[in-house]
Amino acid sequence: MEIPAIMGTKGGGLEMLEIGPCKDNYTMGFQIGQKFSKKIRRRLSTDLILQKQLVPFAYTLNGHHLIQALSDNNKKKFPHYWDELRGTAQGSGVPFLEILLLNFRKEILPFIPKTEEISKDFDNINDDCSSVLVVSDSMAVAAHNEDANVALVGHTYLIKGTLRNGLCFTAYTYAGELSSCAFGFNSHGLAFTLNSVPPSEHEVVAGGIGRNFISRDLLDAKSLDDALQRIQSSEVSVGHSYNLIDVTTRRILNVETASRNRISVHEIGKTPFFHANMYLHLHQVQQVQDENSMSRQKRAALLPKGSKSEFLSLLGDMNDKTYPIYMTGPILYTLCTAIIDLDKQTLSIIEGNPKNGESSYVFSMS
């Protein structure tokens, strides 16, 4: 089975590595680490949350116990992806502990004691994303802003991987992390984008399955039902929102999850569905009231959503100066926009404001 073709590219700053088939996941991870060692090293050295919070906590007794539990549970459930991470650390020449801390960031931060040195604002920096979805007679589209801390600018890349079983995937990847905590698709026509959600701290279960491991597992999913089963079968530590897209059946599901096996599935229909970073239909979860997310949700409700171009205008909206949908800093930044057209069976990546509509990459998903 061939890697899905690139229908067109205008370059841009986003690098891409085509890799595989490799003899095992460790080798794949090693080659990724080798290729992007400079990006990974630079991210590790400049990530203040990693250096100021995660690393010091890892050397405390409580931190050691938590990381050991996370390691044991995730290694047992996903040994191949664990090997992939080991390979990435070895290939890039960085400590495996720091790679682990990056990948378990969301599962560790809630358990770090609050001190005067760690301000509340600094501790609660979220990775925010916006998605708008529709499946109607006239169009079936998933459009997604990939938002993150400004420290991630210049520290992402694309992986086009071929596995030994013939499966191919394409994934937007954060330096040093498993593919993909952002968005991706595979040669079964299954794609996903992700939105973080903010459960209250007491909702987080220590030592559960990490979100990065679950999203990496989705790249191996054979169908929408298979993807749902992979999400449901994981005892997650922290909640998440998944937009599951199947171009072969022309369906989109928004799946909200929380610890203790709580899950809600919403099928996308002809009414456009906007999702920022708040739970919308998994009601039994207490969540942090995020002003940024609520502001984007309210603004999106006012904007037209009748065509793909209007979706892109919505995701490029900067009307609210404090909490714009399209972010340019100083803390949060829209890294890129992904548009999945289920009828054309393409995934396009736009670097820059999506209002301008110029794609850096266009991948065929057929």
Image (tube, rainbow, N blue to C red):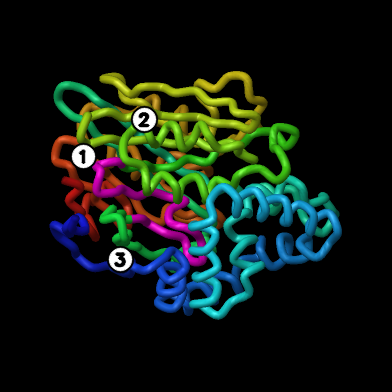
**Does residue 347 lie above or below 248 as drawn?**
below
Residue 341's tag is: 1
Residue 10 position in % (x across, y down): 19, 65
Q: Quadrant of residue 130?
A: top left
Among the two numbered marks 2 and 1 on one chain, the one whose residue lies closer to the N terminus: 2
Residue 203 position in % (x across, y down): 70, 32
Residue 24 position in % (x across, y down): 41, 65
Residue 225's tag is: 2
Report the amino acid beneath label 2: Asp
Over which residues does the magenta segment extend? 171-190
Report the amino acid beneath label 1: Asp
Q: Quick check: 170 left or right of 87?
A: left
Residue 146 position in % (x across, y down): 41, 49
Residue at x-position 63% and y-position 74%: 95
Q: Nearer the viewer, residue 59 or 76?
A: 76
Q: Quick check: 11 left or right of 32?
A: left
10 Å crowding of disc 3: few (<14), some (14-19), many (20+): some
Where disc 1 sits, the SS reads strand
Residue 16 seen by the camera: no
10 Å crowding of disc 1: few (<14), some (14-19), many (20+): many
Residue 260's tag is: none
Report the amino acid beneath label 3: Pro
**Does residue 3 lie above or below 23 as drawn?**
above
Among the two numbered marks 2 and 3 on one chain, the one whose residue lies closer to the N terminus: 3
- Distance from disc 1 to disc 3, alpha carbons, whole Å, reads 28 Å
10 Å crowding of disc 2: few (<14), some (14-19), many (20+): few
Mark 3, residue position = 21
Where disc 3 sits, the SS reads loop
Residue at x-position 61% and y-position 36%: 235
- Distance from disc 2 to disc 1, alpha carbons, whole Å, reads 20 Å
Q: Is residue 173 magenta?
A: yes
Q: Quadrant of residue 191?
A: top left
